[in-house]
Image (cartoon, rainbow, N blue to C red):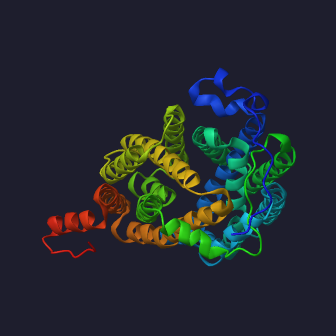
């Protein structure tokens, strides 16, 4: 692997602002660049979650089908399946600080265009699918570049805390965005939501341009002479932890998420509440995520037991939520599920970042994105089909049970290798399992 010349020394703790003066849960906010980043990220997440709520409700309102809603999620993830690894390889060669204003600006143009079409009453279902697909294409490069620049802003010692605080920001965005989105949807309409989303992307682009380059932590970049995509795949496959975490994430992401599908159906079919109840359920989910993010931020080390425990708790709660007799019980279950999911997500993001050296980080993040895309493409239509066919209660129960099985298998592999997992499966099923020695 040919790398760029050695980077200058890492910024000093004094220039970063003195993290030791802040409580442990807030130490990353001592970094001036991260304070700017966090504020812009909050604005962006408010706009994005407003847009997510509006897009989901538009599709469901046009079709009355949870399958169609799941298909939109799958379409958005499809570009990552085809182009994700190449996008990660490209991100490892480029300066993320120069790329992100362009991708964020393109997002703003797309959201603005959808706002204009919606305001004129010209939006059709295929327009929403095209919008989802184009945002997916941009994400192929934007995602890995975002991860690389975040690592440069934080540095290794603040990475875990910064990711956890990012979860707080995202969850706050959920609360504010979904709450505001439901109000705007019921008032001016979805076109205003998409216009606000366009403004939020513009804020992020301008913030990236204003980051102080002297406080960015250096990160190696690959050159054209490198072996590209293969290096990222080779690094992932050489790490048992990465392989297990990503494979477990494939299952839990496919059947243990997509609550926008099941919550919409539970609100409409099971509890007969309509968009108002849908918005309140999503708000409860968002507040739960905020609580989970606050818990994650207080943890100095997000190790594998935390990761596995949070994933198992989320699966168990999801499976039980399908039996909720009334809406407020279901809302409480969604609160708890979201809290566990955020702790799990934060632990996964920290693990992947710390196990990926700088010169292949974009490609490892692209592999993670590819896994997430595969899970969404397979899982969103599957959850939608289960919801339409068996009902939302059954879809939640089946998804939670499968997620629990994935967590149990992952724990066996990490504890004793593939042979231990195979023996555990054999014991449970009564079938003799063969595994390599």
Q: Position of residue 410 (x, y in %)?
A: 35, 59
**Which image quadrant: the N terminus?**
bottom right
Relative vertical location of residue 170 with respect to residue 107 in this rendering, above or below? above
**Residue at 81 percent of width and 47 percent of height:** 8
Q: In this view, does 96 lie to the left or right of 26?
A: right
- Quarter assignment of residue 56: bottom right
**Residue at 71 percent of width and 39 percent of height:** 38
Q: Where is residue 402 in the image (x, y as percent from the top left)?
A: 33, 62
**Residue 105 versus residue 218: which sits nearer the camera?**
218
**Which image quadrant: the C terminus?**
bottom left
Q: In this view, does 330 lie to the left or right of 116?
A: left
- Quarter assignment of residue 11: top right
**Residue at 30 percent of width and 67 percent of height:** 418
**Residue at 45 percent of width and 61 percent of height:** 249
Q: In this view, does 69 lie to the left or right of 310?
A: right
The answer to whether any part of residue 189 appears in the image is no
**Residue 187 versus residue 379: which sits nearer the camera?**
379
The answer to whether any part of residue 99 appears in the image is yes
For this orientation, the residue located farthest to the top is 21
Total numbered labels: 0
Q: Where is residue 232 in the image (x, y as percent from the top left)?
A: 60, 69
């Amino acid at each position: 692997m040919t790398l760029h010349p050695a980077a200058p020394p890492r910024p000093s703790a004094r220039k970063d602002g003195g993290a030791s003066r802040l409580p442990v849960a807030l130490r990353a906010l001592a970094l001036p660049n991260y304070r700017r980043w966090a504020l812009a990220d909050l604005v962006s997440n408010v706009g994005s979650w407003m847009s997510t709520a509006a897009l989901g409700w538009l599709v469901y309102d046009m079709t009355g089908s949870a399958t169609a809603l799941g298909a939109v999620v799958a379409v958005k993830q499809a570009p990552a399946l085809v182009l994700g690894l190449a996008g990660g390889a490209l991100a490892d060669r480029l300066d993320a600080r120069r790329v992100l204003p362009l991708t964020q600006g393109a997002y703003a143009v797309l959201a603005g265009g959808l706002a204009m079409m919606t305001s004129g009453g010209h939006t059709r279902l295929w327009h929403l699918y095209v919008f989802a697909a184009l945002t997916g294409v941009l994400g192929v490069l934007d995602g890995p570049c975002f991860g690389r620049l975040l690592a440069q802003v934080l540095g290794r010692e603040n990475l875990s805390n910064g990711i956890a605080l990012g979860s707080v920001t995202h969850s706050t965005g959920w609360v504010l965005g979904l709450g505001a989105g439901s109000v705007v949807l019921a008032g001016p309409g979805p076109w205003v939501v998409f216009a606000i989303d366009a403004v939020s992307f513009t804020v992020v682009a301008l913030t990236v341009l204003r980051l102080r380059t002297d406080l960015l932590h250096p990160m190696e970049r690959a050159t054209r002479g490198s072996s590209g995509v293969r290096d990222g795949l080779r690094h992932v496959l050489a790490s048992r932890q990465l392989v297990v975490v990503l494979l477990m994430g494939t299952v839990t992401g496919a059947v243990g998420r997509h609550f926008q599908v099941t919550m919409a159906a539970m609100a409409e079919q099971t509890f007969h509440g309509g968009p108002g109840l849908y918005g309140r359920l999503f708000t409860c989910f968002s507040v739960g995520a905020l609580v989970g993010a606050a818990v994650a931020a207080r943890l100095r080390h997000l190790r594998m037991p935390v990761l596995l425990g949070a994933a198992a708790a989320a699966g168990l709660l999801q499976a039980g939520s399908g039996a909720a007799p009334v809406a407020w019980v279901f809302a409480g279950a969604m609160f708890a599920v979201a809290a566990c999911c955020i702790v799990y997500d934060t632990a996964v993001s920290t693990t992947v970042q710390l196990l990926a050296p700088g010169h292949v980080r974009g490609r490892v993040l692209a592999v993670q994105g590819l896994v997430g895309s595969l899970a969404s493409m397979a899982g969103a239509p599957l959850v939608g089909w289960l919801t339409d066919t068996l009902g939302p209660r059954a879809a939640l129960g089946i998804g939670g049970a499968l997620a629990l099985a994935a967590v149990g298998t992952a724990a066996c592999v990490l504890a004793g290798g593939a042979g231990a997992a195979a023996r555990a499966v054999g014991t449970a099923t009564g079938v003799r399992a063969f595994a390599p020695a």
